[in-house]
Amino acid sequence: MVGEASITKKDLELRLADYAELTKRARIFKKELEQYPTPTEVAAHIAWIALMKGHLKDATVLDLGCGTGVLSTASILASARRAICVEIDRELIETAVKVISENYPEVMHRILFVEGDALDVEVVNVKVVLMNPPFGVQPGTRGADLAFLDKALNIANSVYSIHKYSDNLVKLIEKTAEKKGFKFTWLEVLNLEIPMMYPRHRRRVYRVKALLVGLEKALGV
């Protein structure tokens, strides 16, 4: 760990604690796009890791498939200079703008929202990506998470991303990363809590085994 913290991890978690409630309108999340809210404690955790690794302070952060913007908000609260939020769903962007402007006004002017397909957007001068992409397990989104990862590796020097866990996933990500000159700097299994959101859901909370990866471009690549 090499970063200097201007905020404690606990304080960051507390600052984000109400975010889920502020965006808790199930109808804004769409099953066909594999949308679900990033748990606030997970957003704080990712931003904190990026900060401690020296990748976040004063950085411009890119969030591909930003949803309601919690990762970008966490990043700025944790000392990022600005964030670019790319989201294909206008309704989610409108929700993010409302929530952030009303509850995190010191963050709002540092976020640029871009409505569009994350896989098509062209971004330069960004060194770090923090994202929670679609898991790519629905018929219409197969492989989406790896497509997002490939896009991120083409843009930034450091990437933090969440993926649905599978036995072969680590090797697949490692192979993809090595081809582009990246190496693992973080690898962790998470239990994501996803609330009851869609008609097919029958439990109040679903726990999904996920993989958090941190990747960094090797020097000289």
Image: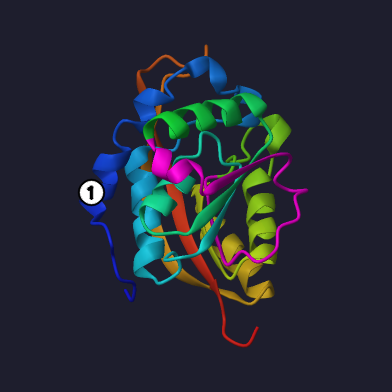
**Residue 12, percent across and down?**
28, 48
The secondary element bearing badge 1 is classed as helix
Task: Rate crowding at label 1 as few (under 14), some (14 to 19) or many (20 or more) other CA atoms within 10 Å.
Answer: few
Q: Quadrant of residue 181?
A: bottom right
Q: Which residue is drawn at 37% across and 17% down?
A: 203
| Left or right: 122 in relation to 95 | right
- Of the 4 image quadrants, the one containing the N terminus is bottom left
**Residue 137, percent across and down?**
61, 37
Q: Is residue 108 magenta?
A: yes
Q: Residue at x 61, y 42 (%)?
A: 65
Q: Does the magenta stretch include residue 216?
A: no
Q: Residue at x 23, y 48 (%)?
A: 11
**Which amino acid type corresponds to the residue marked 1 in the rendered image?**
Asp
Residue 115 appears in the picture as rendered: yes
Q: What stretch is highlighted in magenta?
A: 104-132
**Residue 106, percent across and down?**
40, 44
**Residue 51, percent across and down?**
37, 64
Tell me how the rendering is colored: rainbow
Give the residue furthest to the bottom: 220
- Of the 4 image quadrants, the one containing the C terminus is bottom right
Q: Residue at x 43, y 53 (%)?
A: 75
| Left or right: 5 in relation to 63 | left
| Left or right: 159 in relation to 6 | right
**Looking at the image, which is closer to me, 149 or 130?**
130
Q: Quadrant of residue 42?
A: top left
User: Please, is residue 189 above or below residue 136 in the view?
Assistant: below
| Number of marks drawn | 1
**Looking at the image, which is closer to me, 81 or 190?**
81
Residue receiving disc 1: 11
